[in-house]
Image: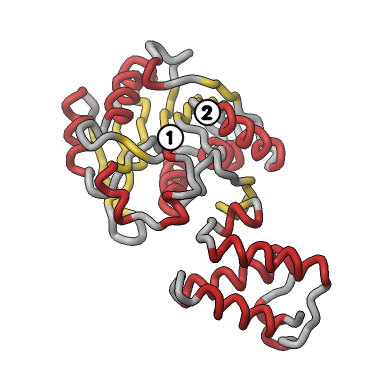
Amino acid sequence: MTLATFKQELYTQLESHYPKTELDSFFNILLQDILGISKIDAILSPQLSIPEQQSHQLMTILQGLTEQQPIQHLIGFIEFMDLKFNVNSHVLIPRPETEELIRWIIEDFTPQQKTEILDIGTGTGCIPICLAKNLRNAHITTIDVSEKAIETAKINATKNKVQVHFLHQNILTTSNLPQQYDVIVSNPPYVRNLEKKKMQKNVLNYEPHLALFVEDNNPLIFYKKIAELALTSLKPKGILYFEINQYLGKETVDLLYHLGFKNVELRKDVFGNYRMTKAST
């Protein structure tokens, strides 16, 4: 099978499932991560023959894509903030807005500062690991209710050569956090059940609902609990950062002010949606 043949097969099989821009992205990801070929080389050598083993692997991935499995699951990892993270059905695939949240924290602190940071909702470990990579003097702890998520995140921490302290814990039943922190950050579950109809099948069918959904009648359950814990567990001038539901920005800000936080800032992501908050004690 040649590159041109595979490209034609990919576009033909998937054009009814995905927009062309996403098909272009799939092809480029597979070029780079499975075949180790750049876009320029592919353009210059469309008749390049693909070895049999890689051809089989590509066709297996193509079958998964027709079933709308996430491409990150099919190749086993995602590149995020110039790092590689293993992903699987036990963890959410990191999104661009989470990178913006992480960069906001990095902007507010320097690598030289000795900072105590707590991340709540480990997942892949993308938040604590990226913070550890960029804030070298930070001591970082992360909590998750899922043992499988913690196993995945530990692998990612080792792969990316950072030290992170992991706790297996249900934050909703937590009475006290283990110490005082300069920063508490969380990207908790926030998608209401009523929003499921807007979601793509590759998310609904293959990513962990435990990390995604909350009940319609109590959508800020995690924000309220984490903020209450933060009130007694942040140091003076400590900061609480949240990734939030874009439809509940005002409600999240109101909650933080009601609980006693100050200087609550609501920030848009690159797509113009309100997706993150910052508040101080």
The disc label shown at residue 210, or none: 1
Q: Is residue 14 above or below residue 255?
A: below
Tell me residue 163's x, y (percent).
Answer: 65, 30
Does residue 153 appear in this view?
yes
Earlier in the chain: of badge 2 and badge 1, it is 2
In the rendered image, is residue 135 in sight?
no
Name the residue: 45% across, 54% down. Answer: 96
Tell me where residue 128 appears, x and y as whole percent.
54, 35
Q: In front here: 69 or 181?
A: 69
The answer to whether residue 52 is left or right of residue 92 is right
Q: Is residue 182 found left or right of 281 in the rendered image?
A: right
**Relative to residue 227, is residue 69 drawn left or right?**
right
Q: For the point 27% across and 50% down, which residue is it?
A: 274
The residue that mark 2 highlights is: 146
Name the residue at 68% across, 63% down.
60
Say if mark 2 contacts mark 1, CB within 8 Å.
yes
**Residue type of the residue flagged with mark 2:** Ser
Give the SS element for disc 2: loop
Location of residue 45 (image quadrant): bottom right
Q: Quarter of the image containing the C terminus?
A: top left
Please say if 6 is above or below 173: below
**Number of marks in the rendered image:** 2
Expressed as whole percent of the image width and height from the top left, the position of residue 265 reads 26, 41
Q: On the image, which quarter does residue 168 sit in?
A: top right
Q: Amino acid at mark 1?
A: Leu
Helix, strand, or loop for circle 1? helix
